[in-house]
Amino acid sequence: MDIEPLDDEHTEEQALNNLRLLIDALTLPAALLDRAWDFVTVNDPFAELWPYAREPGANLIRWVLLSPEARQVSGNEWERDARRFVRALRHAVVAHVDDERILPLLAEVEADPAAGLLWRKENRYRGHGTEVPSAAPVPGQYRFGERTLTLLFHPLLPLEMPRYHVTIVTPLGEEQSAGA
């Protein structure tokens, strides 16, 4: 019996479904994003912390750089986080110029006073469009209502699907806000 190789579209669909299964199986907050930083899928623990991620068209760069909610959640960590996502957007603009979602996202960021200023100031990206900006896990404190969580984000690039990335979040600690 001859076995026919799967066509590229079927293989990509199958690999994407495998990544969705992985995300859903994890007990830690986890998300699958595409190269434009649109959420493809998130598991329940991720959605409990960031419900916006399940909204149609949800984009992580847009949320971090432009959302007042992100600035509130990140608090003193916002500028540090925003700089990382400005570098990620800079990479996407160069590496994925063929993706029609990237340039409109850049226009939104440039039009925002705070994010636009960071875009113009943040020029540490030294790649030529093929390197992914450093995404070493860095812990930070994030506020969710009365709770402050210390979280460590692990960005991962799956070998089978290089146009996608997985983010897994490890909670490192929790504090109750004053007055709770």
Image (cartoon, grey):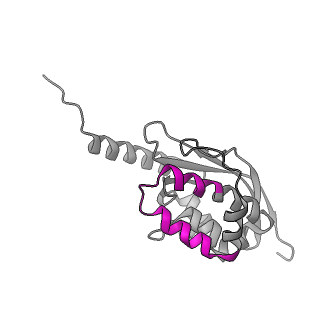
Q: How many marks?
A: 0
Q: Is residue 128 left or right of residue 13?
A: right
Is residue 95 magenta-colored?
yes
Residue range corresponding to the magenta coloring: 87-113
Q: Quadrant of the C terminus?
A: bottom right
Is residue 156 magenta-colored?
no
Q: Taken as a whole, is the magenta stretch helix, strand or loop?
A: helix
Up-down relation of residue 162 to residue 180 (above or below): above
Q: Can residue 27 be seen?
A: no
Which residue is found at the position 65% from the left and 59% from the top? 86
What x and y, as percent, mark residue 64?
64, 66
Q: Can residue 25 be seen?
A: yes
- On the image, which quarter does residue 89 sit in? bottom right
Q: Quadrant of the N terminus?
A: top left
What x and y, as percent, mark residue 3?
18, 27
What x and y, as percent, mark residue 88?
60, 54
Front one among 99 and 155: 99
Front one among 37 and 29: 37
